[in-house]
Image (cartoon, rainbow, N blue to C red):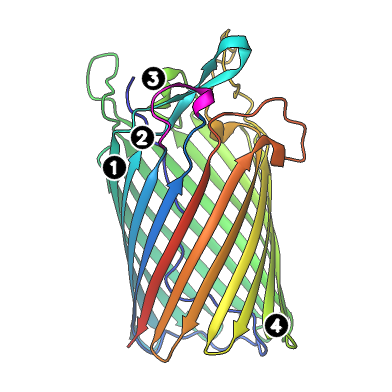
Amino acid sequence: MAATKKRTNPMLAALTTSALALPGLNVKADSAPEAASVGYRFYVYQEGDAPVDKLSSGSPERYSIYVNQFQLLAPLNESVSINFNYIQESMSGASPVGTEAGDGGESQLIMSAASIKESRRDVSSTVRWYAENGNLGMSVGVSNENDYDATYGGIDVERHFNKKNTSVKLASSVSSDTLSPTGRVDEQSKQFTQSKQSVSMVASITQLVSAQAMLQTGFGTTLLSGYLTDPYKALEGDVRPESKNQYTWSAGARIFFAAQDAAMHIGYRYYTDDWNINSHAVKLSWYQNIKYDIQLIPSLRYYVQTEAEFYDRYFTTARSDGFFSTDYRLSSYGAISAKLKYVQTLKRFSYTATIEWYDSSASYSYRNISFESPGLVNYVMFTTGLNFNF
């Protein structure tokens, strides 16, 4: 059986410290940072082993991922800044290929061998122009690994109104990707090469309700086209449409509590697409300021989704439209994650450390799910980093 890999995106956060909703939220005139800063983050991501009692073939040892991220943010003058990011990611382990019928009709998990080793490099840069009532940013980047290349870019503009108590932001991005999976050839015995493209657009509005409260909402859409099938899972039977339209709506609030010297962040996100997947996500975070310029930030997130219209645990007959998949990421399930973040800010330095636990299961869904994919993932991720201001 050929090796398979999962496209990973371990939610790489910006290196600069997140801003808190503190007293005096009045927005100042946009301006470039006064001094340059450099930052470094190190991520460790470890998936739990696949259930051996539900394993049909392959290794139960799932992915371990290590990420190094560097950032440089510098002013070019009073109204222009540049942000440079470099990410190096290495991964090893086994990945779910799909599921098949086992004894008694139960679905059994097909895993790859544990010999997968992969590395990825991502370089991006953003130039931002600042004005009295807003800012404009333009970004470009490239991502490369031995079987996947991506070139992407974007533009965003933010404008403040209503005495700078209201902010509107518009953003758009495009990406062009090339897939050249190892061990795959086409019908003419040539190297298997495919491409896909994506276009994303987002509009959001932020309203300062008072010096201690802020509301946000936003709408987004992503249009995907090209080869959207996982090229490795396709070896075991996986065919998906060549287009996908995604739509999201998000809403949130940030409230500062003076007596506790803390802020609460509440967020909700709804997602739908034309593969018939719908999802809801709710997140609650508490930003607690304590002495010595320390913040402790615990957070909880709940997620639930429905299955794609062409998903099933296994297939005994072909679908009329020709599409089918047993990929666990397209199944119905729920997920719960908990995170604890530590931030300490000194005169020139800031230090962060984060640990996150994630678990997914059909039992976490408020919907009645008749069966659970044995490929559902749980993981632990640890992050540590340092930022230095010149």
Q: Which residue is mark 2?
A: 195
Nearest the viewer among 198 and 16 is: 16
Label 3 is placed on what type of residue? Leu
Q: Which residue is mark 3?
A: 235
Name the quadrant containing residue 183: top left
Q: In the figure, 177 relative to 88: above or below? A: above
Between tags 3 and 1, which lies in front? 1
Question: For residue 118, which numbered disc appears in the image?
Answer: 1
Choose the circle earlier in sequence order: 2 or 1.
1
- Where is the N terminus found, in terms of image quarters? top left
Choose the circle earlier in sequence order: 2 or 4.
4
Q: Which residue is mark 4?
A: 162
Disc 3/disc 4 C-alpha distance (Å): 57 Å
Choose the circle earlier in sequence order: 2 or 3.
2
Disc 1/disc 4 C-alpha distance (Å): 50 Å
Q: In the figure, 331 relative to 377: above or below? A: above
